[in-house]
Image (spheres, rainbow, N blue to C red):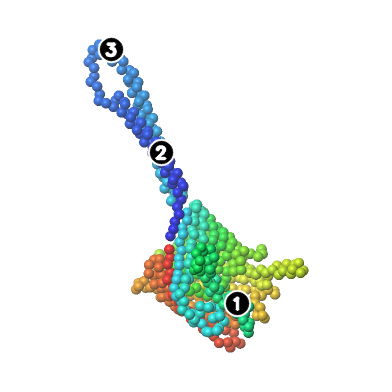
Amino acid sequence: MMMVRSGRRRARAWRLGCASSAALGGVLVTATLAHAQSPGAGPAPEPPAATGAGVAAAAPAAPAATGETAVEARLAASEKRAAELEKRLAALEDAQVAPEDDDGRELLRIYGFIDVGVQRMWIPENSALAAALPQANALNFVVGNFNLYLDAQPSDHFRFLGELRFTTAPGGAPVPVTPPPPGVDARVSTQPFGAFDSTATAFGSPAVYGGLVSIERAHVDWTRFNLFKVRVGQFFTPIGIYNVDHGSPVLITAAIPFFISSRLFPTRQTGLMLYGSTFTGAWELGYNAYVSNGRNENAPFAFDDNRGFGGRLHATYEDPGKLTLKLGASFIASRARDWVVDYKFLEGSTDIHSTWSFREYTGAGDVSLDIGKTRLRAEAAVVRVLYDEGKREGGFGVYAPDAWKTSTYAVAAHRLDFLNMEPFVTGAALHAPIYSSDTLLQFGGGLNFYITPDVTLRSQVLHTITTILREESSAPDFHTTNVLARLILAF
């Protein structure tokens, strides 16, 4: 983790401290010299004899007494000045380390994680799914997630958090080949991954391999009060467990459940959020409420004045080392649409409109329970999608219907002392219109090895069944199997 600290106030305090120390030293030297020159600084002289001449000779001693009084006054003033300078120097030293003056504050922290590994997918040959996944039916070494966090807090009550994911996309993604060869209606091939480095100075320089950088989140928070905080920017939708704690190091499974990957709800949004929490007894109660641009799949901005709204209530009970229980309920209401422009140059007209648009309402609940070394996670969501008249997605005679969509998953894991490993089992279900099917069932398990606090090895096997629950359908089930392992490093 990289940290950038503030030094301006520290440098200023150091300079003032040096100047004050020098001044204090000068005063002390002056005071010492004055003390050395004082008549009382040497040994006391022998008293004169009590004679008339002696009495007469003692009369001129009055000026010496006057000089001694002046030196003592100068010494007292110097000591007073020294005391004042000592107070100023102490105040500067306190300011040099005071946290409220932000010296020593970690203005910017940079941290993150990466997961790499191997995987293989078994999918029926020449199926529609195999045609969409070029990596199917082949053993592949992969770079999964490479995420960096930028965490800045320049003042006490303001914080910025950004998360960037570096990807290899769109390299290897299927793209159309135009024109298709004779006798073929359409052809797709993979997007080239490497590209010639046109900026290289040496002839024959190797190709560069890059991808897209995804802004996972980027928001500024005002955190003056625990019960009332404000967040502005792009944030993860506060729903469930996996969508909020999405980083590989904190998850139990190596693969993301259908609950998230099916995009049943918008996983991230751009807008304004209010949130906070308070304690009552052993419980922590919290809330989130936000307004946003809605789904971010098509664009990070809105095409009209319709907005997305949502919220979440959650409660946490914790008995350290024994039991932790978290409960949550979430709600989302938003609209989504596309944006197209039709130009008619001969008529001199421009038509801006949408080809599809719908309203969606989501309700979800989640529970997280830790009992000793056993961890249980479960989530469920229900979504209602209503298309506007004449604005349905699809084409060629096949269009998306109004639908109820449901999804759920559960994970159970137990940490063992032996090799510090954690076996787990998982199950998931999704019921929604999915091309020619309507239901996905998934079950599997895996094994995690916690090598160090910052290094974890996760492995998982998943078997998925795509089927149709409608009685009138006789289509066969579709089976796929996925085996994967990820080495995860947090830094």
Q: Is residue 90 above or below residue 267?
A: above
Q: Nearer the viewer, mark 3 or mark 1?
A: 1
Q: Nearer the viewer, residue 14 or 187?
A: 187
Residue type indicated by callout 1: Val
Dot 1: element: loop
Residue type indicated by callout 2: Ser
> What is the quadrant of residue 362 in the picture?
bottom right
Query: Residue, x 34% and y 73% (percent of image)?
Result: 418
How many marks do you count on the picture?
3
Residue type indicated by callout 3: Ala
Dot 2: element: helix
Q: Position of residue 409 (x, y in %)?
A: 50, 75
Query: Residue, x 56% and y 62% (percent of image)?
Result: 234
Q: Which residue is mark 2?
A: 20
Q: Which residue is mark 1?
A: 177
Q: Position of residue 278 (x, y in %)?
A: 49, 59
Locate the C terminus and report the quarter of the image it occupies. Answer: bottom left
Query: Residue, x 31% and y 17% (percent of image)?
Result: 61
Locate the N terminus and report the quarter of the image it occupies. Answer: bottom left
Query: Residue lying farthest bottom?
Result: 474
Q: Which residue is mark 3?
A: 56
Say the numbered circle drawn on residue 271: none
- Please tell me which of labels 3 and 1 falls first in the chain: 3
Q: Nearer the viewer, mark 3 or mark 2?
A: 2
| Mark 3 and mark 2: Cα distance apart in space | 51 Å
> What is the quadrant of residue 476 in the picture?
bottom right
